[in-house]
Amino acid sequence: MSGRLLRLVCTAAVAAGTVLAPLPAAAAPVPEPSERTVAEPRERTDAEPGGTDAEPGERSVTEPGERTVAELLTDLQRLYQEAEQATETYNATEEKLREKRAEVTRLDTALSRARLSLHDSRGAAGRLARQQYQSVTGISPYVRLLLARDPQHALEQGHVIGQLARERAKTVGRLTGTEHRADALARVARKALDDQLTLAARQKKDRDDVRRKLADVEELLASLTAEQLARLAEFEEKGVAKAQEELTTSGALGEAERRPTAVGGKALEYARRQLGKPYEWGAEGPRTYDCSGLTSEAWSHAGTPIPRTSQEQWARLPRIELKELRPGDLVIYFPKATHVAMYMGKGQVIEAPRTGEKVKISPIASHPILGAVRPDGAGQAPATEAR
């Protein structure tokens, strides 16, 4: 499909999970979007248009002439959300693979050192064996000690003999311990390498899954007419505006405008500098980003590393109420935590939306909100101020 068509449709990005009522015929006016709950988006059933329980690999895109504009919009939302969920799954596998590669490198280095130490220990043991062999035909040092006439000399010889025995025992012990350590490291290194190969295969599967999901999106977009695209854009704008108004007037965001912490301010400033850069699934900068790539890099540059994926950010970072939001906090979207944006204050967020769009400022209610997290949970922000 043409770049113009993709850009036009991407401006029609609709908050996934919105309950959509079918639109009337093309000549009729567009109705107001139906009500939705921002914090708790309604789950769709298999019988509803846009249900998300299709078997993997199945194409549920039907001919556009058989569906209303609202149904096409719902289908488009579902496909975008499935693509983003597949992207975050790919990101999680990529993160595990990165950690496993580092572990394999560390184990290989340790194994190389252990093998060098083993080589040295075997050399020392070989010298010890030769010394023992050469002393077999001679008089035992213990016999020489007994025949000595000078007691002092005898004691000195005894000390030397004891020292030699201890060094021999130490050499044998070092050889045995080094062999055991090298064997153990070799087993762990082989296991780590097998895990790496397994993750690499899973990463390829996840990558192919993302590409299939995006192909479904492109197939549907290519089937839409210019009239349908225009009506989708109009419907989307009204839906987001209504959801944003409901959220802000409900008092869910609190009555005071909070300031960021020093670290949160740095993260937000980094995110601001990325405005206008393209979205690319699996990317974490510096030229392109996906949603969690943007938020994780922003906080990392601020000196507070956080998990790479939106699901891990939701699972592992301290959760806060929406009324406690301050700039720099992260807003998590959709029931499965498949999208994330950074709060910038006054009911707006910075986000990397999806394929075909760029990092931008959006209303916080652009998507169904799951909750919010605070990367610097223990950080203290300056006093709040009135809105």
Image (tube, grey):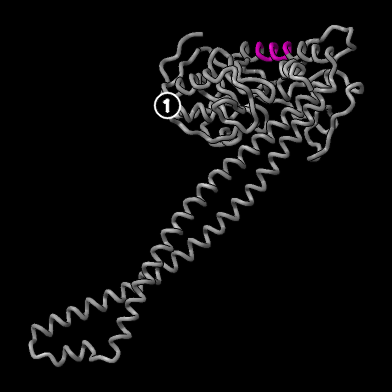
Q: Is residue 82 above or below residue 103?
A: above
Q: Which residue is located at x 52 percent, y 29 percent? A: 297
**Residue 307: x %, y % from top left:** 54, 35
State the residue position of label 1.
379
Q: Secondary structure at mark 1?
A: loop
**Is 322 or 266 nearer to us in this picture?**
266
Q: Which residue is located at x 55 percent, y 43 percent? A: 98
Q: Which residue is located at x 61 percent, y 39 percent? A: 92
> Is residue 128 in sight in this rendering?
yes
Q: Amino acid at mark 1?
A: Gly
**Is 233 or 37 nearer to us in this picture?**
233
Image quadrant where residue 330 sits: top right
**Residue 238: x %, y % from top left:** 73, 11
Q: Is residue 247 above or below residue 16?
A: above
Magenta span of residues: 237-245
Tell me if 345 is positioned left or right of 25 in this view: left
Q: Is residue 284 magenta?
A: no
**Is 10 or 254 nearer to us in this picture?**
10
**Residue 39: x %, y % from top left:** 65, 23
**Residue 63: x %, y % from top left:** 90, 26
Tell me if 210 is positioned left or right of 306 in this view: right
* Residue lying furthest right: 66
Q: Residues within 10 Å of mark 1 (few under 14, many from 20)?
A: few
Tell me if 23 is positioned left or right of 263 in this view: right
Tell me if 149 is positioned left or right of 126 in this view: left
> Is residue 370 in sight in this rendering?
no
Q: Is residue 240 magenta?
A: yes
Image quadrant where residue 248 sits: top right
Q: Is residue 71 above or below residue 129?
A: above
Q: Main secondary structure of the magenta part?
A: helix
